[in-house]
Image (cartoon, grey):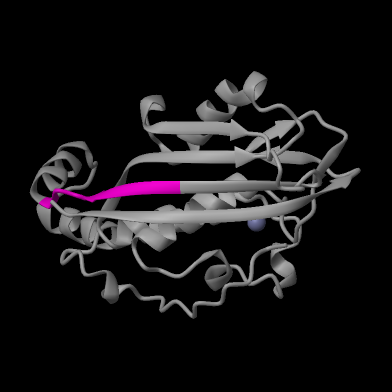
């Protein structure tokens, strides 16, 4: 088994009159986060941590802010792509640890709901998702929300997973299962074999 680690960071400025979405959770607050997409900084940072862990570039590699297609986009789409990339590289998430830094709104009262939503989006047990909140003391960050995320991944044990998929898959014979399986998981775990080459465009969806 091999392990990989990824680090994600994001920040967005608060903006009156737009919906606030953090961690895929809609939050009742007079200000939202400005961004080309829905401004969900937590999902953006998680996406970058996952892509970074398999050296697949970053969110801007896949969803350039110059593309009008992503205007107002639901950030769960970005997260889904990152999940596909790590599966393609032959990895799965062990756990993630997140820090949100903002003055308002207070995260503590909504932290449990947010954690549940993120765990659901990542198909992880709740115990493998940590979300902590801090206020930006002394940083002069009153109008900005910041997120830091670390994600730990482990390689998928192919023989074991193959057996499990074989047992669960509703396909007629083993040859078909191999085909399905190959599309899901890289046999070699060679992350350089990924079809999409990252351009290392570091633009964010701001
Ligand atoms: Zn962002």
Residue beneath the point at 54% across and 52% down:
45
Give the side of residue 191 with respect to residue 111, left or right.
Answer: left
Q: Is residue 53 visible?
A: yes
In percent of width and height, residue 159 lies at: 8, 49
In percent of width and height, residue 22 lies at: 66, 39
- In this view of the protein, which residue sits in the foreground, 73 or 12? 12
| Residue 88 vertical placement versus 136 (above, below) | below
Q: Quadrant of residue 183?
A: bottom left
- Write down which quadrant ligand 1 falls in: bottom right
Q: Quadrant of residue 55?
A: bottom left
Give the side of residue 50 with respect to residue 106, left or right.
Answer: left
Give the residue furthest to the right: 17
Query: Is residue 178 covered in magenta?
Result: no
In the image, the segment drawn in magenta is 150-158
Residue beneath the point at 16% across and 67% down:
188
Query: Is residue 157 covered in magenta?
Result: yes
In percent of width and height, residue 153 lies at: 30, 49
- In this view of the protein, which residue sits in the foreground, 69 or 198? 198
Residue beneath the point at 75% across and 70% down:
68
């Amino acid at each position: 088994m091999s392990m990989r680690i990824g680090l994600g960071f994001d920040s967005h400025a608060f903006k009156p009159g737009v919906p606030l979405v953090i961690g895929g959770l809609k939050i009742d607050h007079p200000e939202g986060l400005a961004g080309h997409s829905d401004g969900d900084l937590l999902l953006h940072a998680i996406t970058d941590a996952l892509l970074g862990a398999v050296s697949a570039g970053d969110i801007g590699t896949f969803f350039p802010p110059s593309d009008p297609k992503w205007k107002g986009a639901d950030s769960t789409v970005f997260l889904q792509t990152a999940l596909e990339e790590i599966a393609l590289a032959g990895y799965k998430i062990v756990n993630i640890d997140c820090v949100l830094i903002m003055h308002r709104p207070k995260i503590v009262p909504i932290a449990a709901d947010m954690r549940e939503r993120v765990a659901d989006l990542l198909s992880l047990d709740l115990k493998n998702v940590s979300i902590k909140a801090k206020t930006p003391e002394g940083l002069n960050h009153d109008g900005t929300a910041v997120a830091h995320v670390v994600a730990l991944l482990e390689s998928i044990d192919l023989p074991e997973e193959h057996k499990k998929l074989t047992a669960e898959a509703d396909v007629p014979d083993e040859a078909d299962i191999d085909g399905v399986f190959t599309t899901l998981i890289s046999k070699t775990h060679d992350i350089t074999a990924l079809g999409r080459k990252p351009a290392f465009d570091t633009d964010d969806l701001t």
